[in-house]
Amino acid sequence: MSRFWSPFVRDLVPYVPGEQPKIANLVKLNTNEHPFGPSPRALAAMQAAVGDDLRLYPDPNADQLKSTIADYFDLASQGGDKSWVFVGNGSDEVLAHAFHGLFQHDKPLLFPDITYSFYKVYAGLYHIAYETVALNPQFQIDPTDYARPNGGVIFPNPNAPTGCLLPLLAIEQILQANPEVVVLVDEAYIDFGGESAVSLVGRYDNLLVTQTLSKSRALAGLRVGLAVGQPHLIEALERIKNSFNSYPLGRVALAGAQAAFEDKSHFEAMQQMVIMQRDSLELKLQRLGFDVLPSGANFVFARHPNHRGADLAQALREQAVLVRHFKLPRIEDFLRITIGTPDQHRALLSALETILA
């Protein structure tokens, strides 16, 4: 704390990102990074972008990337085009702009009680009143719980850290119950088994869908996120962006992101590899006695009936296996385990067998 701070800074509760330790031979299964690497075409495009042109500013509107994303989602079939797309420096920045530009209203913002902790961080940063909505006993979102007065709705699909998916019909139920406020579907993990709500944006003028290239396209280090919605929602994000940083994506990021969307064959192959690894890990954890929630993400959320989550996380750490543990009510005995490579899974399961013996 300093006398030089603006008064509101004292009350901020900053987000704490997943641990990134610098430990040799660590089996790192705590931050949901992709185990198999980005598109070779994306890597080549980024390497080609490193040259004399870096002396020039990038396109502030990211027109080529937006057009590529619009084509990827076939927005033309819904009457849309690149004006329905927003891009930013990671989905975190995109979400922050949405909080700032779309959720500052008289009524409280609604989001699940078990979800990303940074939703509360953004609400605090922008002085947004909010109410959390309890997940049901199966750790699922119940759409009927969101049919009440509010200033907006946001939820991840699949949810995090639970990994549980909400079908499009349930999302439509939430949209139809809230026609006068924005409903934001945060789809960081949608490509690992779910159906994107982007297919609904042409029918619902209050729907905004966000995604990231960090997870399914293995570009967490590049920091590229996006939003898709009708132009009146996108304009709010553009106004915030251009009042904050007109150049959120550099030339290298723009080139890599565009190539990653264009390389569908690599994306689909890696997507299926992660899903296969996830399904295999779920079965093996169940054989060890774990309860595993159904996952549509690149992680599983599991607990053992005979062991505290904190104890398991610490015991795994002592064997150089890092997973994510949350000290929160209802989920304090769960571990969130990122889907890794076969070798990483073998190390994890071997460590668990030793711990549980």
Image (cartoon, rainbow, N blue to C red):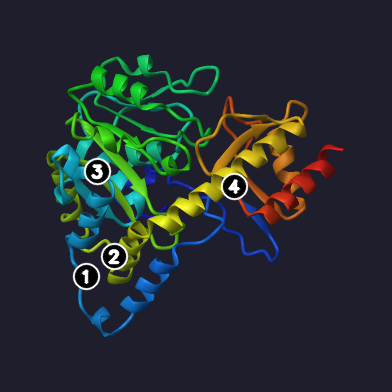
User: Marks 2 and 1, Cα distance to the nearest angstrom?
Assistant: 8 Å
What residue is pinned by disc 3?
228
Tell me the distance, in whole angstroms, between the alpha carbons under discs 2 and 4.
Answer: 27 Å
Q: Are marks 2 and 1 in contact (CB under 8 Å)?
A: yes
Q: What is the quadrant of the C terminus in the image? A: top right
Q: Earlier in the sequence, mark 2 or mark 1?
A: 1
Please indicate whether residue 271 sits to the left or right of residue 26 in the image.
Answer: left
Q: Earlier in the sequence, mark 4 or mark 1?
A: 1
Amino acid type at mark 2: Leu
Check disc 4 and give the amino acid type. Answer: Ile
Residue topped by disc 4? 339
For the residue labelled by badge 4, is the local secondary structure a helix, a strand or a loop?
loop
Q: Nearer the viewer, mark 3 or mark 1?
A: 3
CB under 8 Å between discs 4 and 3: no
Q: How far apart in space, not on screen, are marks 2 and 3 (Cα)?
A: 17 Å
Find residue 31 and report its horizontal and vertical position in percent. Answer: 54, 50
Q: Which mark is residue 254?
A: 2
Picture quadrant where residue 213 is located? bottom left
258 versus 108 height, above or below: below
What x and y, as percent, mark residue 162? Answer: 53, 32
Q: What secondary structure is marked by label 2?
A: helix
Q: Amino acid at mark 1?
A: Pro
Q: What secondary structure is found at the residue carrying circle 1? A: loop
| Disc 3 from disc 1: Cα separation | 21 Å
Left or right of 78 on screen, residue 38: right
Q: Nearer the viewer, mark 4 or mark 1?
A: 4
Q: Position of residue 23 (x, y in %)?
A: 67, 64
Label located before the other in sequence (2 or 4): 2
Q: Nearer the viewer, residue 201 or 133?
A: 201
Q: Residues within 10 Å of mark 3 (few under 14, many from 20)?
A: many
Which residue is tagged 1? 58
Under circle 3, the secondary element is strand
